[in-house]
Amino acid sequence: MPPEASWIILHNMIHAAFIELSTKGFTDIVNITEEIKSILSSSSIRNGQMCIFVPGSTGSVTTIEFEDGVISDLREAIETLVPKDKEYKHDKRWGDGNGFSHIRAALMKPGLTIPIIDRHLTLGTWQQLVFIDFDNKSRSRSIVVQITGE
């Protein structure tokens, strides 16, 4: 018989914030690293994890080296995988022309979690956090950031 798990949570805290963005759509990639670091600094959490989440079905967050060449390469790769000029069943049903946006966001995912150690995000040297807007028009976006830990 396996041992029973017992948990004692001491000094657990939660800090939540939002990042508000205006985006252009069509794979607009926005570096949000500094905003994320600022949210961490405003919290009192030393060790834990940060969840970054995009409500909605046409946006995504990920990490990448935020450099013009890599950004261009990512846009090209996404266009190759999920072309915007293909016929999508979603477009036939709703007539909004953003079927490609939903598929791209589903593949890239709406959120990620980053460990926090000693008040620092555990990002690699060239790793930045980005929001990607896949929709086919400009949008106002809100990104949810929640930090849990102690």
Image (cartoon, rainbow, N blue to C red):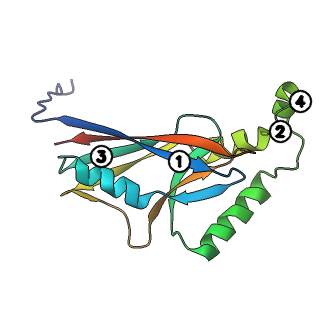
Q: Residue at image x 29%, y 46%?
A: 49
Q: Residue at image x 69%, y 50%?
A: 25
Badge 4 or badge 2: first in the primary sequence: 4
Q: Quadrant of residue 136?
A: top right
Residue assigned mark 4: 92
Q: Is the C terminus in the top left, top right, bottom left or bottom right quadrant?
A: top left
Judge whether 67 appears above or below 62 on screen: below
Q: CA distance from mark 3 to mark 2?
A: 37 Å
Q: Is the N terminus in the top left, top right, bottom left or bottom right quadrant?
A: top left
Question: On the picture, is 137 further left or further right than 10?
Answer: right
Badge 1 or badge 3: first in the primary sequence: 1
Q: Nearer the viewer, residue 80 or 57?
A: 57
Question: On the picture, is 116 further left or further right than 54?
Answer: left
At label 1, the amino acid type is Leu
Q: Residue at image x 90%, y 41%?
A: 87
Residue assigned mark 3: 49
Residue assigned mark 1: 21
Q: Mark 2, residues whose alpha carbon is within 10 Å: few (<14), some, or many (≥20)? A: some
- Between label 1 and label 2, give the one nearer the viewer: 1
At label 3, the amino acid type is Gln
Check whether the beta carbons of the residues at disc 1 and disc 3 lie within 8 A of each other. Answer: no
Residue 41: x %, y % from top left: 24, 54
Q: CA distance from mark 1 to mark 4?
A: 29 Å
Could you say whether the residue bearing mark 2 is in a helix, strand or loop?
loop
Q: Quadrant of residue 110?
A: top right
Q: Nearer the viewer, residue 37 or 77?
A: 37
Q: CA distance from mark 1 to mark 2?
A: 22 Å
